[in-house]
Amino acid sequence: MVKLSVVGTGYLGATHAAAMSSLGFTVVGVDVDQSKIDLLRQGKVPFFEPGLEELLKTEVDSGRLTFTTDFSELADCDVHFICVGTPQKKDSLAADLTYVDASVAAVAPHAKAGSLIVGKSTVPVGTANRLATMLQELNPSVELAWNPEFLREGFAVEDTLRPNRLVVGVTSERAEEILKEVYAPLLANQVPWIKADLPTAELVKVAANSFLATKISFINAMAEICEAAGGDVTVLAQAIGHDPRIGSRFLQAGIGFGGGCLPKDIRAFMARSEELGARQSLEFLREIDSINLRARQRMIDLVRSDLGLDLKSKKIAVLGAAFKPDSDDVRDSPALDIASQISAAGAHVSVHDPKAIEPARRRFPHLLYSSAIDECVAEADVILHLTEWKMYREIDPSEMKTKVRQAIIIDGRNALDREKWVAAGWKFRALGRS
Ligand code: UGA
């Protein structure tokens, strides 16, 4: 059986390493961050991802999954998965490839002849060909392939073990055969297998994320129109979603997309299209980005239309800090962006989240955080529902009414039961619903 290494142990790498180990492979996870490796060795995950810690613990205990900071321990592996981050550069829209380049450079000298380096990170098209050339110089006995990852945070384990497709960018039949061997247990469940060249494999990933971002911004543009025309975007979304060519998923209007993927991926894609001389082709993504950021502003406008332009001395309770439920990831979180802008306008903002308070506090230390919903909403002039955690849908509006100063709630995710809140005497507002 082939032996695997996974370089980079964040969301993608830690999940991939644990999942591959659960399929029976011997896996060594490598990271330059000693504190992360120390935690993983104890079977602990440094972030919240449902089901991952249990899986990781089982695999570490089985002895199949080990972690190290020493790249020489990869020497006997047959396949090396590169799973490091590609964040947005500080000074431009482009992706920062420092970690990907450094990982390939670190693996190459230790990789044994005939082994395969497989990129899983999301990269601008052309990166794999450039890395393949680099590899030719560093270690010509090793081959490069690209195998983009489509996992969603919150469903990372499920998406890794039961993906809806496997895409492999390869330059030889041998590379494809090796990857087929690695993914054999998944292929046994009829997962579609798509063989591509390196550029197409890279493009599939950013095309998919661009499409998803477009779907969300489309429905948020419809929400703007509904607000202007007196319509209801939730009914509109439900109605168009019945057309199977459109589909109902990713049509949840609200404060828009955030996280470590969609926003930076569409920006990096635009930056790359310019380099390729094809700027016009992706010009629409600029509008997708603007609609998305505008949704945050519309939420703040709604608050002002209820509480008045001057937010000083107003108490605003924010339910949700993570960029989406079932995650403690606060990277580019629309909820925290809104909370921070309202706080900058002088309001007294209190934020609740079941999992993301500590990561949120690290990024926005000036906001106030509550670990209990009751404490968060006490004496609030308005409640903003900004991340659709299940626990918020289970709130009893009648009971909550006794805690606040004014019974006004604005649903920024269109996920609460409006009738229930209105029946309990609340003024209920939402984006895209007049
Ligand atoms: C996204 C993609 O969905 C994954 O397929 C991809 O692998 C991943 O990026 C990645 O590139 O690594 P993720 O960032 O975990 O996954 O989050 P999504 O579930 O796509 O949600 C992104 C954002 O869109 C969230 O802020 C969510 O609240 C928002 N969203 C989603 C909406 O506003 N409306 C919707 O209808 C759906």
Image: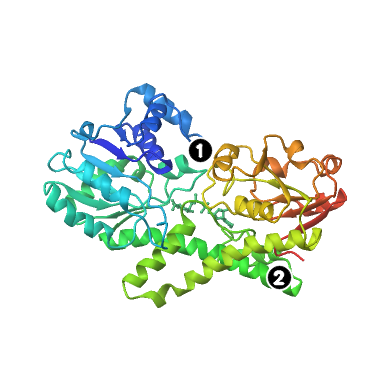
- Residue drawn at 12 percent across, 52 percent down: 137
In the image, is 25 to the left or to the right of 382?
A: left
**Residue linked to disc 2:** 226
The first of marks 2 and 1 along the sequence is: 1
| Residue ranking furthest to the bottom | 280
Q: Residue at x 41, y 60 (%)?
A: 91
**Pointer 2 with pointer 1, Cβ within 8 A:** no
Query: Residue 88 at x, y = what percent?
Result: 42, 56
Residue drawn where x is 77% and y is 54% of the image: 312
The reply to whether residue 172 is in sight is: no
Three-letter code, disc 1: Glu
Which quadrant would residue 234 be assigned to in this image? bottom right
Front-most of residues 2 and 102: 102
Q: Does ligand 1 reach within 8 Å of label 1's beta carbon?
A: no
Rendered-image quadrant of the C terminus:
bottom right
For residue 303, what is the image quadrant?
Answer: bottom right
Residue 263 % position (x, y): 49, 59
* Amino acid tagged 2: Cys
Q: Position of residue 121 (x, y in %)?
A: 35, 50
Q: What colouring does the structure picture have? A: rainbow
Q: Residues within 10 Å of mark 2 (few under 14, many from 20)?
A: some
Q: Nearer the viewer, residue 112 or 3?
A: 112
- Ligand 1 within 8 A of label 2's CB? no
- Locate the N terminus and report the quarter of the image it occupies: top left
Q: Residues within 10 Å of mark 1 (few under 14, many from 20)?
A: some
Name above or below for residue 368 compared with residue 150. above
Q: Is residue 398 left or right of residue 23?
A: right
**Which residue position is annotated with label 1?**
49
